Structures are given as structure tokens and as C-alpha cells.
Image (cartoon, helix red, strand yellow):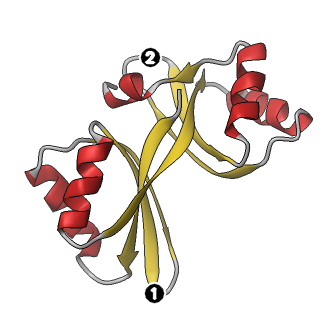
Amino acid sequence: MAVKQISIFLENTKGRLADVTRILSEDNINIRALSLADTADFGVLRIIVNEPERCLKVLKTHNFVAQATEIIAVEIEDRPGGLYKILEIFDKNDINIEYMYAFVEKKADNAIVIFRIDEPEKAYDILEKNAIPVLSSDIISNI
């Protein structure tokens, strides 16, 4: 059920982010979600796309340093307390979150939260036991 995310390491220079989006656009790769973190010298762009394997290949062809990682995409209620419900479950079950980001799905009243977890199998089990919907790559790619 894991979703592949592409992490791209970018120099913190003018136009570098535009270069990535131009290349993906030219290859008809659609960004479904993204997160950007930066330091003084570099940034890490994390993206979920419609074709992760092809995206990785295209980026490497253009000399970007990029890698695929597995993340967990969880559907939560888009209301006050929706995120807390999931975080409380993770906390009670001693599941560590390395990082997370979210986006709202435009066709439904729910939000999608992306989690990078250090023990993904344990997280899947806990989410299933608590009837929390975990989304597949196919679903995320077609949102």
C-alpha cells in the first residue's frame, strides 16, 4: 500500500525549482502533492507524481539528484481534530513520524496526509485496526 514519493535535492539558487517543474511538464508528469524544505545552501523537494518511476528516470537524465522513498498516505476528515485523531493513535502506539505534509482532495470533504514513518509495517497494522483509510499509489496518482 505504500506510495512512492520522489525526493529531489536542489541547490538553493534562483530558477532551480522552475527547472524541475519545467522538465516534468515537458514530460507530461503531473505533480499530485509537494513539500519543499530548505537550508541556506540546498533544498529538498518532495513530490508525489502520477508516474514515479518515469519521473525518477527523467530527473536523473537531467542530472538531478533524486531518489524514491515510500510514504504512507492517509485519508482524514477535513475538520478540526481530524489530524489529531491520527496523531493520537500514532502516539499511543509509539509510532515515530519522521516528517509529514498534507493536501486537500478536491473531489471529497477529506484531506490527505502524507507520513514518512520509521516503522511503516507497524503503522499500517495500527491504521487498519483503527479503520483509518490508507490510500494506494493508484488512488493518489489519479486524484
Q: Would residue 81 be found to the left or right of residue 72 on screen?
A: right
Residue drawn at the location 86% of the way across and 39% of the way down: 91
- For label 1, the residue is 41
Q: Position of residue 55 (x, y in %)?
A: 25, 50
The quadrant in which residue 41 appears is bottom left
C-alpha span from label 2 to label 1 = 39 Å
Q: Would residue 89 be found to the left or right of residue 62 on screen?
A: right
The three-letter amino acid code for the residue at tag 1 is: Asp
Q: Is residue 60 above or below residue 139?
A: below
Instruction: Using the image, tell me which numbered label, if any, was put on residue 9.
Output: none
Other residues around mark 1 within 10 Å, as few (<14) / some (14–19) / many (≥20): few
Other residues around mark 2 within 10 Å, as few (<14) / some (14–19) / many (≥20): few
Most foreground residue, 111 or 133? 133
Q: Is residue 130 above or below residue 99?
A: above
Residue drawn at the location 44% of the way across and 47% of the way down: 5
The three-letter amino acid code for the residue at tag 2 is: Ala
Secondary structure at badge 2 equals loop
Q: Position of residue 21 (x, y in %)?
A: 22, 58
Residue drawn at the location 82% of the way across and 29% of the way down: 89
Q: Position of residue 128 (x, y in %)?
A: 71, 17
- For label 2, the residue is 108
